[in-house]
Image (spheres, rainbow, N blue to C red):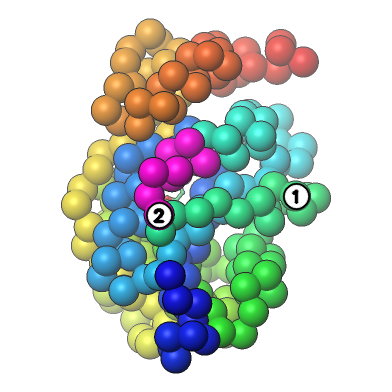
């Protein structure tokens, strides 16, 4: 494949941040759809770092979430995975993700941050949101159960934020974890390799509040 500079235009890079605990077909459809509609050359999936001191919110080890993301994206030549958030100490902030990816890829790369409507509404309430728009274009994809209307983002620069309707996938990682803990199948909600990885590693077998007992 031609690099951005060889082809005479910048490399159009989607950035899909998430906890990916586990990655599921909602994430993959979102990335694939934005890649097609925005003519992206690549989408890099960026699993978040391990949250610090969040007793109320147990998250699987970063290496498990990283490996699941690699397994789920391996067959798509335009999908890749970055460790920037996993390797940076402390909590993950989108501005750091975008700064690091931008620094890693250089000036010929144009960033498109891909986010579900639920996560987008949170990000846009943050302070320092103007810096985010200097770093990337934001694509907010529809998500079942989340009602984000164009008027909700009308105060934001129109050339920096786009809402996109995508095929509805009523899937969440929370539901996948609950189903596993409750003995229900997650086949077809996540890629086959992810079902097998979760089973092999014994992830989500206990309820979220029992997890601490693993030490
Ligand atoms: P959890 O239930 O643990 O929050 P999740 O399913 O929301 O997990 P995340 O890792 O939190 O997954 O999400 C990463 C990104 O993918 C977020 O921007 C989120 O809005 C988006 N996303 C997740 N699931 C979907 C879906 N089914 N459709 C569209 N976007 C999604
Ligand atoms: Mg979420």
On residue 2, which mark appears? none
- The residue positioned 38% from the left and 50% from the top of the image is 76
Q: Which residue is mark 2?
A: 77
Question: Picture quarter containing residue 115?
Answer: bottom left
* Mark nearer the viewer, 2 or 1: 2
Q: Quadrant of the N terminus?
A: bottom left
142 relative position to 101: left or right: left
Residue 200 vertical position relative to residue 82 in the rendered view, above or below: above
What residue range appears in magenta?
A: 69-77
* Residue 72 inside the magenta-drawn segment: yes
Mark 1, secondary structure of its residue: helix
162 relative position to 88: left or right: left
Residue 161 pos. (x, y %): 39, 77
Classify mark 2: residues with Cα within 10 Å, few (<14), some (14-19) or many (20+).
Answer: few
Taking the image as drawn, is residue 150 in sight? Answer: yes
Residue at the bottom extreme, as displayed: 8
CA distance for labels 2 and 1: 24 Å
* Residue 187 inside the magenta-drawn segment: no
Q: Are marks 2 and 1 in contact (CB under 8 Å)?
A: no
Residue 87 pos. (x, y %): 75, 50
Q: Which residue is mark 1?
A: 87
């Amino acid at each position: 494949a031609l690099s951005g500079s060889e082809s005479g235009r910048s490399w159009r890079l989607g950035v899909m941040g998430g906890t990916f605990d586990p990655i599921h077909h909602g994430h993959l459809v979102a990335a694939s759809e934005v890649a097609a509609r925005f003519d992206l050359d690549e989408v890099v999936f960026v699993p978040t770092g391990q949250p610090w001191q969040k007793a109320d919110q147990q998250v699987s080890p970063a290496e498990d979430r990283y490996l699941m993301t690699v397994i789920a994206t391996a067959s798509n030549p335009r999908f890749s995975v970055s460790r920037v958030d996993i390797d940076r100490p402390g909590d993950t902030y989108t501005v750091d993700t975008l700064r690091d990816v931008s620094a890693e890829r250089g000036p010929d790369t144009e960033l498109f941050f891909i986010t579900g409507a639920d996560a987008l509404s949170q990000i846009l309430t943050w302070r320092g949101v103007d810096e985010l728009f200097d770093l990337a274009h934001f694509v907010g994809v529809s998500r079942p159960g989340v009602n984000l209307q164009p008027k909700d983002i009308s105060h934001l620069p129109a050339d920096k934020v786009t809402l996109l309707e995508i095929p509805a996938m009523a899937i969440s990682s929370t539901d996948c974890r609950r189903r596993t803990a409750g003995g229900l199948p997650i086949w077809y909600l996540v890629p086959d390799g992810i079902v097998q990885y979760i089973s092999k590693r014994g992830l989500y077998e206990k309820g979220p509040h029992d997890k601490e007992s693993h030490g």
